[in-house]
Image: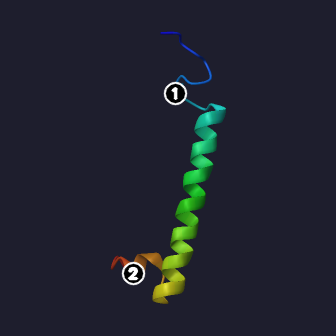
Amino acid sequence: MENNSRNSWNWGFTAGAENWNGRLAMIGFISAVLVELVSGQGVLHFLGLL
């Protein structure tokens, strides 16, 4: 099997890792905004931490 450098997973601060980090951060931010819009309270209050 041929090891293609585009498909191999590299650890550390790589372009692929930064892309995934950005995507997951956007999903988390949108989720927090939706929770606040739907429930009328912040995420920490929604989870019962405050």
**Percent from the top left, x then y, of residue 19?**
63, 43
Check disc 1: other Cα within 10 Å, few if <14, some if 14-19, many if 20+: few
What is the image's colouring?
rainbow
Q: Which residue is mark 1?
A: 11
Taking 19 as reference, is 15 above or below it? Answer: above
Nearer-the-camera pick, 41 or 2: 2
How many numbered marks appear?
2
Quarter holding the C terminus is bottom left
Query: At 47% from the left edge and 9% from the top edge, which residue is drawn?
Result: 1
Outermost left residue: 48
Residue 46 - label: 2
Residue type, label 1: Trp
Residue type, label 2: Phe
Query: At 52% from the left edge and 27% from the top edge, which residue is drawn?
Result: 11
**Percent from the top left, x then y, of residue 3?**
53, 12
Nearer-the-camera pick, 38 or 45: 38
Residue 23 - label: none
Q: CA distance from mark 1 to mark 2?
A: 35 Å
Query: At 61% from the left edge and 32% from the top edge, which residue is drawn?
Result: 13
**Percent from the top left, x then y, of residue 38?**
49, 86
Taking 16 as reference, is 10 above or below it? Answer: above
**Percent from the top left, x then y, of residue 42?**
48, 81
